[in-house]
Amino acid sequence: MSTKRAFWLATSFSLGILTTIAAIGLITGLLGRMLGDIGSYGNYIVAIIFFVIGFHLLEIIPLPFLGKFNQPVFRKKGLLA
């Protein structure tokens, strides 16, 4: 792989990560403002949802209904693959 191609792949990856983190931060900030308005019971419900999803991502508990969304097999390579 040439240095130029490696540079552009690394740059596109970095910009993608930066954009994703910025979007998540914006959404979290906006929802965080709204979560304060749902009361203490709402906060507990949201915390339980976050823990369940976290345990699922750690493969501690299975959530079978999420298995219906299988990822497609990607065959392309490169900048926009």
Image (cartoon, helix red, strand yellow):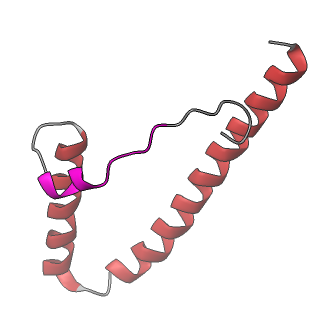
| Residue at 62%, 43% in the rendered image | 17
- How far across and down, in percent of the image, does residue 64 sit? 13, 52
Q: Which image quarter holds the C terminus?
A: top right
- How far across and down, in percent of the image, does residue 12 sit? 75, 39
Near-viewer residue (43 or 76): 76
| Residue at 76%, 30% in the rendered image | 9
- Horizontal side of 69 relative to 23 (left or right) equals left
Give the magenta part as a residue range: 64-73
- Horizontal side of 69 relative to 2 (left or right) equals left
| Residue at 78%, 34% in the rendered image | 11
Name which quarter of the figure residue 58 lies in.
top left
- Horizontal side of 50 relative to 61 (left or right) equals right
| Residue at 70%, 37% in the rendered image | 14
Question: From the viewer's perspective, is residue 47 above or below residue 66?
Answer: below
Labels in figure, total: 0
Near-viewer residue (41 or 16): 16
Name which quarter of the figure residue 68 lies in.
bottom left
Q: Which image quarter holds the N terminus?
A: top right
Near-viewer residue (81 or 10): 81
Magenta span contains residue 10: no
Question: From the viewer's perspective, is residue 37 above or below residue 10?
Answer: below
- How far across and down, in percent of the image, does residue 38 sit? 25, 86
- For this orientation, the residue located farthest to the right is 4
- Horizontal side of 48 relative to 18 (left or right) equals left
- How far across and down, in percent of the image, does residue 10 sit? 74, 29
Near-viewer residue (21 or 65): 65
